[in-house]
Amino acid sequence: MTLLPIVERELRVAARQPSTFLLRFLTALIATVFWLALFGSRSPMTTPEDIGQTFFNAASIVLFIGCAFSGIFLTADTISSEKRDGTLGLLFLTDLRGHDVVLGKLTSSSVRAAYALVAVFPVLALPLLLGGVTVGEFWRVVLMLLMTLYLSLAIGLAASAFTRQSRTSMGGTFFCMLFVTAILPLLHYVIEDHVTLAFLRLVLQWPSPGYTLACAIDDPPDLGNYWGSVMTVAAMGTILLILASLALPRAWQERARDAQRIRESPRTLLRDWSNPVAWLAVRQQPAPALVWGVLGAIVAISVGFAAHSFLSSGTGRWMRSSFLLAFVAAFATHQLVKYMIAAEASRRFSEDRSSGAMELLFVTPLTSRQIINGQRDALWRLAFGPVFLCAGLNAFLFVFFVAKMPFFGPAAHAWQLGVIGGIVLLAADYYALSWLGMWQGLTQRRHHRALLNTLARVMLPPWIATFVIVTTLGVRGMRVEEVLACWFVVSMIASIMSGRFAQARLQGDLRKMVQASPEFRERPWHSPVERMTKQRAVAHEAA
């Protein structure tokens, strides 16, 4: 008998899939292009050691962010999707245990990410040839990235084991990673100057993978805290996997109180919605108390650091660093709201498409426009308050900046542009994410894939385009405000184009998309060519 049968099967399946090798190739290619672009944009006064150190630090931070949030899209919906499909209980009719299922899901979800991460390591080692990075620093960063990926995947599996909805599991994974990577360092920043709380600072630092990264690239390295943080992160991931394995055999069953809550909750909403699609979407939205509680906590952190900066005397470290933390917290609030919009926009159509409910809607007298308007009305009901909360927070930071002026010169204009431009960009991103999220919900088989594609197509192109423009057209001459203006313009163009494309396809081809084959839904860009080919074939047969 095989010791871990699901793990063995998932490894065999992943080894045969072309996407595994394609992802590894693309990841190494992107890292190589990033290296060549950075190396080619260096100034004559820059030494090879400085270039190697800059690339190593930048690549380490980018890989760290990818590893930290990989669990949201890889493992957060693996077990919960089995619960919704009703197939998880079939596994426990056999002699499989909870750890078999958990380790099998971990293997199937992490093998592609692990392959892609390993493919980047040779490119990450190129600075060793330039002398800007030591061998010990390289291997410390490699171990840190592996432990961060392990913790993120473990958090995603634990959240998926205890929840049923993809929105809940993915959101829980995001908040847990945000807590250990951002909230804990912020708490350490607050008590940094209190010598009597040295042990408490240690407790706040070691569980954070971000602190592990700081210790790994620090010069000279802090090996004691580095190894303590690595072991703490590994222990946290292992404990989460054990808890998921123990709770999974009893957590997969449907609770009677959950079913009762689902049956009773729409009764209070039926009077407020004339569109049944809007009523259907609103009934499973997250509770307002949860949404406002999470957003309120992050906004309170931003306002608190802004007040701390305003009350600080002079223009020293505390004033500027506190304002920077307030700006980062506001930026995190914007990203959280955008994630919520993308998740809700894609969830309803994705679930209805998988369960067959979307086909039933077209049997009713409802038109395509009514279905789309109902989904958008329900989405706006959820996002109305958070969007205006983010806009109000940006307005507060702008007034504070004008009153206190923590930065002077060209940097002041860059900060003002970033705060005001964030309000305009939030409206453009809402337009893009709402339409593109519905489109991806129809074209993707799983909700987490629809969410990932929606966020990637709206949020990723501005960063890529800005990096290309800066590195090829004037990295040595562009000022900070020019780079920020370039990023803002590209973001607006990407949001408008993405939203316009999805809006046109939904309004024109919604019924065709629901009735089309899976191949058509997964490759919608082939539809014009396929229609032209079919028309030519019909004309040829008629002739």
Image (cartoon, rainbow, N blue to C red):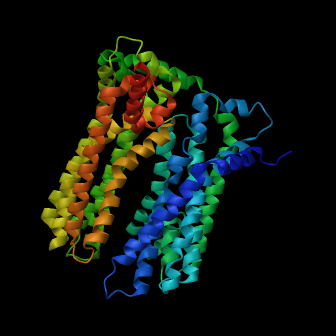
Position of residue 538 in the picture relative to residue 400 (left or right): right
Position of residue 230 in the picture relative to residue 267 (left or right): right
Q: Residue at x 46, y 60 (%)?
A: 65
Q: Nearer the viewer, residue 293 or 89?
A: 89
| Camera sees residue 238 | yes
Q: Residue 510 appears at what percent x and percent y?
A: 36, 26
| Camera sees residue 58 | no
Q: Nearer the viewer, residue 210 or 421?
A: 421
Which residue sits furthest right? Answer: 1
Quadrant for the N terminus in the image = top right
Q: Residue at x 52, y 70 (%)?
A: 212
For residue 450, above or below residue 374? below
For residue 192, above or below residue 448? below
Q: Residue 346 appears at what percent x and percent y?
A: 41, 35
Q: Nearer the viewer, residue 89 or 6?
A: 6
Q: Nearer the viewer, residue 528 or 254?
A: 528
Q: Residue at x 23, y 53 (%)?
A: 422
Q: For residue 315, which quarter of the picture?
A: bottom left
Q: Residue 109 appears at what percent x and percent y?
A: 60, 48
Q: Residue at x 63, y 62 (%)?
A: 234
For residue 121, above or below residue 369? below
Q: Residue 36 appears at what percent x and percent y?
A: 41, 73
Q: For residue 277, which quarter of the picture?
A: top left
Q: For residue 399, which quarter of the picture?
A: bottom left
Quadrant for the C terminus in the image = top left
Which residue sits furthest front? Answer: 543
How many numbered circles does the render carry? 0
For residue 458, above or below residue 413? above
